[in-house]
Every structure is written in C-alpha cells, then in structure tokens.
Amino acid sequence: MFVVSLVAIMSERERVGPISRLLENRLFRSFLIFSIFRAIYGAGIVIITYFLATSDEAPIWVSVAFLLSSMVISRVIFRAIKKRWPGLA
C-alpha cells in the first residue's frame, strides 16, 4: 500500500510542501499581507473609535469623521506597502 505524502519532491535536494507552494502564489501572498494589515489596523481603529465615542467632550460626528478618514488612510498605507514590496499582486 502506498502512502500519499503531502510533500512533493521537486528535486533530490529540495522538498516543497503545499504550504510553501501556496505562499509562493502572488495572489495568496497579497491576500495574506492585506489580511494581517487590516487586522492590526482595524483593531487600532476600533479602540480609538471606542474612546472617541464614549468621550463626553467629543461629539458623535468626530467618531464618524475619524472612521471615514481611516478608510482613506488605510488605502494610502496599503498602497505604500505594495510599493515597498512589488512582489505583491
């Protein structure tokens, strides 16, 4: 009985698994970087918005304006990330 291995032998000295092949895909790598960026950036935005919304001194429109501006700023930051790493899709 043959055991099917998840590791494909590319050459005698190099083994490449399915995770390595997946990480070599430009589209997947771009999706992964964008997801990590959005998770970190989004958590920061939620925390700041919470403090703005629960603050007695700041009116509610400050929170809304902050959220709207953060959408634009996140695109600018991600565009800068893509310029720094041109290998992303």
Image (tube, helix red, strand yellow):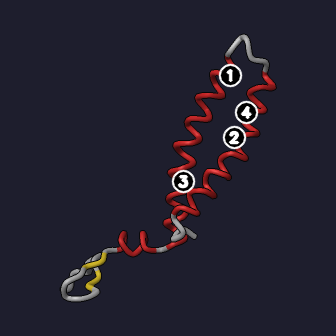
How far apart are the two marked residues, 3 and 4, measured between alpha carbons? 21 Å
- Which sits earlier in the primary sequence, circle 3 or circle 4? 3
Residue indicated by mark 1: 52
Residue drawn at x 29%, y 82% is: 8
Foreground residue among 72 and 14: 72
| Disc 2 and disc 4 in contact, CB within 8 angstroms | yes
The mark closer to the camera, 3 or 2, is 2
Q: Measured from the top left, where is residue 87 in percent x and y?
A: 51, 71
How far apart are the two marked residues, 2 and 4, measured between alpha carbons? 6 Å
How far apart are the two marked residues, 1 and 4, measured between alpha carbons? 9 Å
Residue drawn at x 24%, y 88% is: 11
Foreground residue among 3 and 44: 44
How far apart are the two marked residues, 1 and 2, measured between alpha carbons? 14 Å
Residue type at tag 1: Leu
Q: Measured from the top left, where is residue 66 in percent x and y?
A: 73, 33
- Which sits earlier in the primary sequence, circle 3 or circle 2? 3
Residue type at tag 2: Ser
- Which sits earlier in the primary sequence, circle 3 or circle 1? 3
Q: Residue 70 bears which disc, if any?
A: 2
Which quadrant, please, contains the N terminus?
Answer: bottom left
How many residues crowd mark 3 within 10 Å: few (<14), some (14–19), many (20+)?
few
| Disc 1 and disc 4 in contact, CB within 8 angstroms | yes
**Residue 54's quadrant in the figure?**
top right
Residue type at tag 4: Phe
Q: Residue 66 bears which disc, if any?
A: 4
Residue indicated by mark 3: 35
